[in-house]
Image (cartoon, rainbow, N blue to C red):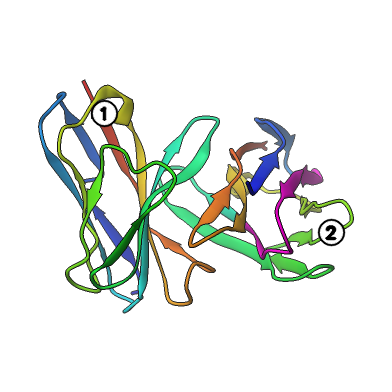
Amino acid sequence: EAQVTQNPRYLITVTGKKLTVTCSQNMNHEYMSWYRQDPGLGLRQIYYSMNVEVTDKGDVPEGYKVSRKEKRNFPLILESPSPNQTSLYFCASSEDGVRVQYFGAGTRLSVL
Amino acid sequence: GDSVTQMEGPVTLSEEAFLTINCTYTATGYPSLFWYVQYPGEGLQLLLKATKADDKGSNKGFEATYRKETTSFHLEKGSVQVSDSAVYFCALIGYNKLIFGAGTRLAVHP
């Protein structure tokens, strides 16, 4: 089954404690992206990757890091989480650039 | 910059009612337009798309027409069901990303 898998689905942490949210896709897609969803703001792009070893900033990259060492994986790293990073995070992938994207089920993060 | 504006929700309807969710956009050129749907506890799924002016996207009884004159892409369905309760996002293609509206929550009651 074609899917984008994120882990964990729910996470509660404290300010400053490094965390990683994993994202994996099984569709051999070149393009992957991270978004955050906040009430009234829709989804905003954090980082994206056009291919292995190629990543670039989206609209709200501050406080986040990513890596793309393998085509299937695109982890999101918060080196020192802060309360304003409390949000719902989605990973997405696409085979044809940015057009039709497949989304993971989301990770709800709370930073206390 | 490019942006998408959706009608505010929530939208509450009875089963079998007619649905319209308004979406307008601001963009340079004529980008592809999308409607995504997010069911409770799930990620977003592509509902329909239109790639050029006057195109009509359709899926699962939903329709939307790309209107360049009014820069709009309104979502419609003739008869909604309880199972259509979800959050609906209008989006356009920006530079290496999708640009989303704020989302409109739809609640359909029996």
Vertical side of B25 occupied by B14: above or below? above
Element class at badge 2: loop
Q: Residue at x 27, y 34 (%)?
A: A109
Label 1 crowd bin: few (<14), some (14–19), many (20+), radius 10 Å: some
Q: Chain of mark 1?
A: A
Front-lying residue, B42 or B94:
B94
Q: Which residues are magenta?
A: B17-35
Vertical side of B49 occupied by A62: above or below? above
Instruction: Kindly identify which residue carries mark 2.
Output: B67
- Report whether B40 appears left or right of B4: left
Label 2 crowd bin: few (<14), some (14–19), many (20+), radius 10 Å: some
Q: Residue at x 79, y 45 (%)?
A: B20
Does B30 appear in magenta? Answer: yes
Q: Quadrant of residue A110?
A: top left
Vertical side of A38 occupied by A51: above or below? below
Front-lying residue, B99 or A25:
B99
Q: Residue B66 at x, y = what percent?
A: 79, 62
Q: Residue at x 59, y 40 (%)?
A: B103
- Report whether A100 appears left or right of B75: left
Q: Amino acid at mark 1?
A: Ser
Front-lying residue, A101 or A98:
A98
Q: Residue B73 at x, y = what percent?
A: 76, 54
Q: Amino acid at mark 2?
A: Arg
The C terminus of chain A: image quadrant: top left
Element class at badge 1: strand
Does B26 appear in magenta? Answer: yes
Task: Identify the residue at the far right of this view.
Answer: B69
